[in-house]
Amino acid sequence: MSEISDSTQSTGTSGCPREFLVSVELYVPTVASFGLRKPVVPRRKADTSKTEETPRSLKEKSSWISVSRTPAGAGQWRPATCKLTDEDESCSLNIYVDETILYQTIYIHMLNHFDIRHADSSLFLRKNCMALTSAGGQRWGSSANTEPIYFQFEDADTCNTWLVLLRSYSKPEIYGQTFVSRDGGLYRMWRQVELSILQGRNLGNHFKPQLDTNASSATLSEGDPREADPVDLDAFCEIHLNDNICARTTVKKGIGSPDWFENFSFSDLPPFETLEVTVWREKRLLKPMLLGSVRIALTNFRRSEAVEGWFPIIQAGGVSSSIQVGEIQMKLTVDEEIILPHASYLGLLTVLRDRNVLEWMSDFERRPHLRTTSYQLMCIAIAKNILVEHIMEYADREVDGTPSSHNTIFRGNTTFTKTMELAMAFYGKAFLESSIGSTIRRICSEKIAIEVDPVRSGKGAKEVERGVDQLIYWSQEVWNQIYAVRNQCPHELRRLFEHVRKLVEKHYHTKDSQDPHNRELPCQSVSAFCFLRFIVPGILHPHLFGLHPGLPSARIQRSLTLIAKVIQSLANLNPNVQKEEFMRGIKDFLKQNLPSMVDYILVVSTPVPLDPYSPHSGHPAHSHQRLNVVSSLHERSTTMPVLERESIPLLPHVLDIPRHLARITSSVLRNARSADTKGKSSEGNNQYLSGLCAQCFDLEDQSLARVSQLASVESYPIALQWDAPRMTSSAVPPSPASPSKFVESRKVSRPYTAPSLSDLSAADHQKASSDNKIPLSPAPHDLSNLRRGSVSDIPTSPQVPEERPVRAMNRPRFLRPKSISADSISSLASPTGAQSLRSPPEFQDLEANRKRKNVLQGILTKR
């Protein structure tokens, strides 16, 4: 990939346009590349670095390279330059290929936040990619192509910086902003889908599907007793959200039952519509053939609950003529959260600050509904820059100098070790990739099969000796790469490793000890984290750390297991101890590399003065390009409304504190209600959790009040007249080619969290027109009786209210009306339509009696 030229450059002062430049790799579809010069193909050299990054077996498959819904033709990646121009009233992104040819112009100020997202690495087998989705009126180009635009950046830091920069000029999904001036609206929304594709069975066999004709989505299969002859085929899956492709699995060979075990996470999504998983059959020298698909309606899918089961794969056709061609086992979790302004969470933050983050994690680990909340707590601590200090403080309690203390901190599965694993995975992702990523992909692409156990191989001593030589060679390759990048260890991890090492030296007096085993304890304490819980798991399971697409085959997995054993033996600093007899042949390798392992441990556990502009400083927080972006964001944020400003993620790790707090709130409420339904005290005698739970119930009341306020304003008869969200061509910045096109924003449906006008009874309408107070029940049903996941209470074919347009207003860009907020009303609306955020006293009294009822979840589930 081309180098970043001048990183990100910002020019201009107040009143002058701001400009940002970056060099990227651009994906150009085949159709769009007809009018461009053919890229220069360099002569093939002996260097196989490109082949290492993308296995040959995967590059040859057209279905992996195509992004279109049907794998028709492959596109190409070309060097490009992106130029972002901010002109106050508009913001455009010009994309140039071949240095001077304008390929596309994207009007960023017309896009929504969810139009700018990270692209899953499985689409192109490339990391650090970003996808821009835009309609015809939001872009200009020489071709009529409307597919998403994909960029690949030099590294994750540059990708995150530009993601935040582009989103700062786009429109967040804020509701209630047209009639509530305070905070710039009522709330914003966030959505996520986590999907695991596990296994398939009976693929290729044809059955009459056992489906409910009234069902709006695929239903779980109860296990089909019908038997069929297994079909030998290669299969892969494509994942589509709202009919846009988002990810692909690897191609797996299996006699009707391939194993994938691949995990995907899609965040910052638009309003839910459908999730579709299409299953393709791969054939050599032929285009892949579509077997069938699983289609799931997400609008009425249970929220925040993992659903796992076998889903029927249906071949295209009407309900009466549909054919089931197998089943696929999947695990699906759908999240949708209301995010309030940051000020609403101050009480919750105060409670969280009263304790060490690891103490909260320890309490959460004992409660099933809160186990996944530890990551949200960690993200908040990272954003507040307190995680490293809290881990150090907790480590002081773990290492107390007792004979068994070092064994606990080295091997025990405690809150401290779990948090260290989370911190290493968060801070050290790029470090792990540079340490073992390329070598692991070489092993997988070359299908290296190593076996040194004569019992497993069933071969003679000569073959076993050859396997040992092969194991030593690849172990040396892995270790050489690990050692070569030791100076790239992140600064945060160096501080943590140094603290652990010095704690052991202090409490066990290792420097004065005559026992050689005790003298090795400080280094072993570091290797117990750096290798046992970080690098070695990455070697064993590269697909779980994003180092390789998909689960390796059994033979390759065996090779990785043997290499991981060798590296861990080296990290233990004791080359004379080998549990398996067949591993004794690597003793010379261990003795030879022992000094370099000691040096490695000392380097990664010794912080160095930070050079913010060094590419190997391991700490990108003050890079030149980000300083320019952060400076620009700080200058512009003073004029942004509160919710819009808070919707811009924080660099360098793209964190959103209110979003993490909202997710913690939902988890705590689910845990409290789960305990109540089982007849248990939700928090027992834990005063900290009791205070946390009380704050979460208060936040739920605030969310309910804001959603009800939005529903009450929409219930006014004057709000029945909506204008189209349309922008004239004069409002669009002219492109260099001055295209004379009429630009129209994409239509977006109303927020699903607000009851539609059709859901309001006649009495509600009459009351809304004669009373300014927030209605106690904006929906015709008792919302307190609804529960998250009560699918039976939801119509199978929910009626989505009509899209009501908004008339663009002539005001500065940072105060522009957001077309995504379909709750906007006409400028002729009565000022009484805007309600105060503070609820009337009688409303507060009634709501206090309903505090422990699942009201907010019912609103989120109601469609």
Image (cartoon, rainbow, N blue to C red):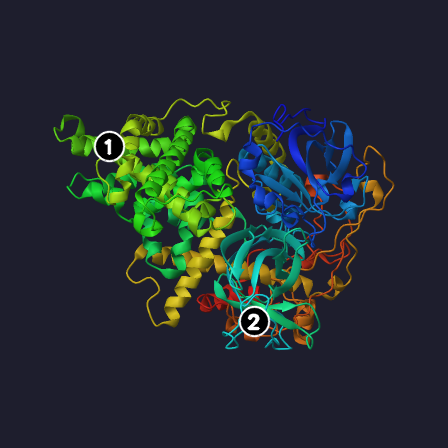
The residue that disc 2 covers is 219
Q: Position of residue 616 (x, y in %)?
A: 47, 25
Question: Dot 1 lies on which element?
Answer: helix
Examine the image and state in which quarter residue 730 appears: top right
The amino acid type, in three-letter code, at marker 1 is Pro
CA gap between label 1 and label 2 equals 55 Å
Residue 493 appears anywhere in the view: yes
Query: Which residue is at a point 84% across and 34% down the rendered structure image?
Result: 737
Residue placed under numbered mark 1 in the picture: 522
Question: 10 Å neighbourhood of mark 2: few (<14), some, or many (≥20)?
Answer: some
* Camera sees residue 125: no
- Can you say whether 681 is above or below 807 in the image? below
Residue 393, given in percent of the width and then of the height, sits at 29, 39
Depth check: give the residue in front, 569 or 578: 578
Q: Nearer the viewer, residue 81 or 344?
A: 81
Question: How far across and how far down the image is residue 433, in percent?
Answer: 47, 37
